Image (cartoon, rainbow, N blue to C red):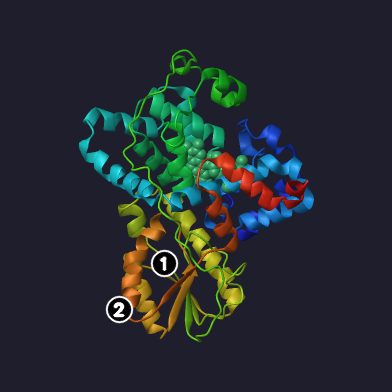
Amino acid sequence: MNPFTPLTRQDALNTWADFLPKVAAYAGARNSVQPGHENVSRLSACIRFRTLLEDEIIHDTLKTHSFRTAEKWLQEICWRRYWRGWLETHPQVWSLWRRQVRELKHVLPAETLARARAVSAARSGVDCMDKIARELLETGYLHNHARMWWASFWVHVEQLPWELGADFFFRHLLDADPASNTLSWRWVAGLQTPGKTYLVRLSNLEKYAPSYLRENATGSERLADDIVSARVIQDTATPGAQALVQYPTSFSQTSKRIGLWMHADDLSPEIGPLRDLAPAAIFSCISNSVYQANYHLSSQRIASLHTVIRDGMERAQAHYGCPATVLAADDQAQALGVWARDQALTDVIAFAPMVGPTRDLLPRLKQQLEALKIPLTLIRRPSDTIAFSFATAGFFPFWQKMSRHLNPTAAAC
Ligand SMILES: Cc1cc2nc3c(=O)[nH]c(=O)nc-3n(C[C@H](O)[C@H](O)[C@H](O)COP(=O)(O)OP(=O)(O)OC[C@H]3O[C@@H](n4cnc5c(N)ncnc54)[C@H](O)[C@@H]3O)c2cc1C
């Protein structure tokens, strides 16, 4: 197991069992970056791919700690759902970011691109920032504060395009999440919350960075509090919100030959609304060529996708007792169509993919299945439906609604 990032469900459960007692100290401890990162959970990759569910974490937390003791922890757990819910109603922010990543590489001056490459290869000349980049390249994990410092360094000190910095994170973070990553970078750049920009400051590093990041001060004068200032960046994304697409939250099976499509946005179908499904077959797809050609993912990140998908498929096969096939295919939509036809399926069911790479496959996938007259049913977890419906404005109005939902007794007082 990667010491920083558990991936399989068993590793996630072990890590979570170790961390559950530490939840009480989390609010006070979470901001410091410590060697080994024992003060934070390191559960992000499992939660992102849902080899461990937020619902399970919230349930165990409230069984063990009071809401008051665990509030900060619960807030952080809910941040991802807030970002995901927000992106569901602003999908253009994701698609425009992906377009910009492709286009900027052709239109930016050669020296800007060379500098972006040097900074992301841990050669900026600012020692503490280069150590953070190296940690990301080596482990695929960074503490939240290190992500904030480094993103701010990229945007406001190096004055590089946020889109390329977000892409660097997306290619290397094992927990890379289209919503948390894109929207956190936009927040650091001052685009997500009007009037709010996150600035990296030496005084903050001195307070929260571990000694290994501070021992060599080379280049740190560029991070001095009175030197770093916010760069004003124009938002190219159209700000309007679309209506949240509604999906059913339950399913009653009428067909015998139903196929379950499993993808990286939710790898625990055995828990929740699809638990009692009786599929004839289960299918998932791994696409190294797409991971490399379209997203330029690091080999460590590709390996982690293989691990989580295979883990999810093994659990699903054991739970449903039917064949589970992981295909390696360049064209996932076509592969799913061929599989559905060969299995003589009458229906395909899946969790609704969230805005991001899997959602981008949907139009072609629907087309393939429609040509075969096989309906595709998409289901959303009831808890996502509730959380996403709260994510209409900023995080704090979201949290007011969410905390009343999680802790109805306090709301009644
Ligand atoms: C620039 C930037 C990019 C980021 N990119 C990603 C990303 O691609 N994927 C990702 O999972 N997180 C991302 N985050 C959010 C956050 O940094 C990570 O979720 C967190 O550091 C993961 O480590 P952990 O599991 O040890 O966190 P813990 O502190 O143990 O938190 C527990 C869980 O709460 C959630 N969480 C905590 N902080 C945040 C946050 N700020 N935003 C959203 N959810 C949070 C995560 O699910 C996390 O696993 C990003 C933050 C920044 C500033």
Amino acid type shown at disc 1: Cys
Question: Would residue 168 be found to the left or right of residue 4 on screen?
Answer: left
In the rendered image, residue 56, in percent from the top left (x then y), is placed at: 67, 57
Q: CA distance from mark 1 to mark 2?
A: 20 Å
Q: Residue at (76%, 41%) from the top-left corner? A: 69
Q: Which mark is residue 56?
A: none
Query: Which quarter of the figure has residue 167?
Result: top left
On the image, the x and y values in percent for residue 257 come to 48, 85
Q: Is residue 404 above or below residue 305?
A: above
Q: Is residue 143 left or right of residue 117?
A: right
Residue 201 in picture, x, y percent from top left = 51, 20
Q: Position of residue 319 (x, y in %)?
A: 61, 74
Residue assigned mark 1? 285
Residue farthest front in this picture: 412
Specify which label sits upstream in the sequence, 1 or 2. Answer: 1
387 up-or-down from 284: above or below: above
Element at badge 2? Answer: helix
Question: Is 15 in front, or is 260?
Answer: 260
> What's the residue at 41%, 50% (across, down)?
299
- Label 2 CB, ligand 1: below 8 Å? no
**Quarter of the render that holds ligand 1:** top right
Q: Between tags 1 and 2, which lies in front?
A: 2
Residue corresponding to mark 2: 371
Seen in the picture, residue 336 relative to 382 is either above or below; the reply is below
